[in-house]
């Protein structure tokens, strides 16, 4: 249970692992970046349990990579969800003109979730979170798209240069007679 909330090594190491996995995907830089952006966007929507599915649908629509979309949903995790949910709720309340966030009657969230009363959760909670999640999710998705596309292109160029350098060193190390076929 502990490793679900706290990685074995560190959060930085886990982030590096995800970044390397994304950079090494075999797809175009646009497809990888569009997939990551789709996952990031969906992480700002309050529909837990549907994030992978929605990210895959959005990635498919944008000609993005499905695996990259799954990696993109990692932006929504137990550490970031409280921040994301608070920001999306407040933004949604502001857009919808609900007055100050939290000014309405208490939600009694535990009771409504216990009875799975979705209709009563929509107006006071899910609607503002969805409306607020769209602009925030789009802003973060655009940022992650640009960052990912640039990173993938730079990683591939650096890798190509390394491979060319390695091939050049191998060619120089071979005897002259061996290169001509002997």
Image: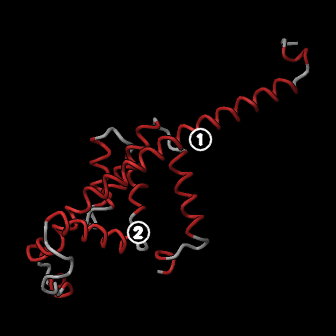
> In the image as oriented, which residue stretches furthest toward the left?
119
Q: Quadrant of the C terminus?
A: top right
Q: Residue 134 location, x and y as percent?
A: 25, 57
Other residues around mark 2 within 10 Å, as few (<14) / some (14–19) / many (≥20):
few
What residue is rendered at 16% in x and 84% in y? 107
What residue is rendered at 36% in x and 41% in y? 64
* Left or right for 178, reference 47: right
Would you identify the image quadrant in which residue 106 lies? Answer: bottom left
16 or 123, nearer to the observer = 123
Q: Residue 5 location, x and y as percent?
A: 47, 76
30 or 176, nearer to the observer = 30
Q: Which mark is residue 155?
A: 1
* Left or right for 100, reference 31: left
Give the answer, above or below, for where 177 lies relative to 103.
above
Question: Which residue is disc 2 drawn over?
Answer: 77
178 or 133, nearer to the observer = 133
Q: Residue 128 location, x and y as percent?
A: 18, 68
> Which of the two discs, 2 and 1, labels the residue nearer the N terminus?
2
* Left or right for 95, reference 147: left
What residue is rendered at 37% in x and 72% in y? 83
Q: Mark 1: which secondary structure?
A: helix
Give the answer, above or below, for where 81 lies relative to 156.
below
Q: Residue 66 location, x and y as percent?
A: 37, 47
Give the answer, above or below, for where 33 lies relative to 127.
above
Mark 2 to mark 1 CA distance (whole Å):
26 Å
What residue is rendered at 41% in x and 55% in y? 72
């Amino acid at each position: 249970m502990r490793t679900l909330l706290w990685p074995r090594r560190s959060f930085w190491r886990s982030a590096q692992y995800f970044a390397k996995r994304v950079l090494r995907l075999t797809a175009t830089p646009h497809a990888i970046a569009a997939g990551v952006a789709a996952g990031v966007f969906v992480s700002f929507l309050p529909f837990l349990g549907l994030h992978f599915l929605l990210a895959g649908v959005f990635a498919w629509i944008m000609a993005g990579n499905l695996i990259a979309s799954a990696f993109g949903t990692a932006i929504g995790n137990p550490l970031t969800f409280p921040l994301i949910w608070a920001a999306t709720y407040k933004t949604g309340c502001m857009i919808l003109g609900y007055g100050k966030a939290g000014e309405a009657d208490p939600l009694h969230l535990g009771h409504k979730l216990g009875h799975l009363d979705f209709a009563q959760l929509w107006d006071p909670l899910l609607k503002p979170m969805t409306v607020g999640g769209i602009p925030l999710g789009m802003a973060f998705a655009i940022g992650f798209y640009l960052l990912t596309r640039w990173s993938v292109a730079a990683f591939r160029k650096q890798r190509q240069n390394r491979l060319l350098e390695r091939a050049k060193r191998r060619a120089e190390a071979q005897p002259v007679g061996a290169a001509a076929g002997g």
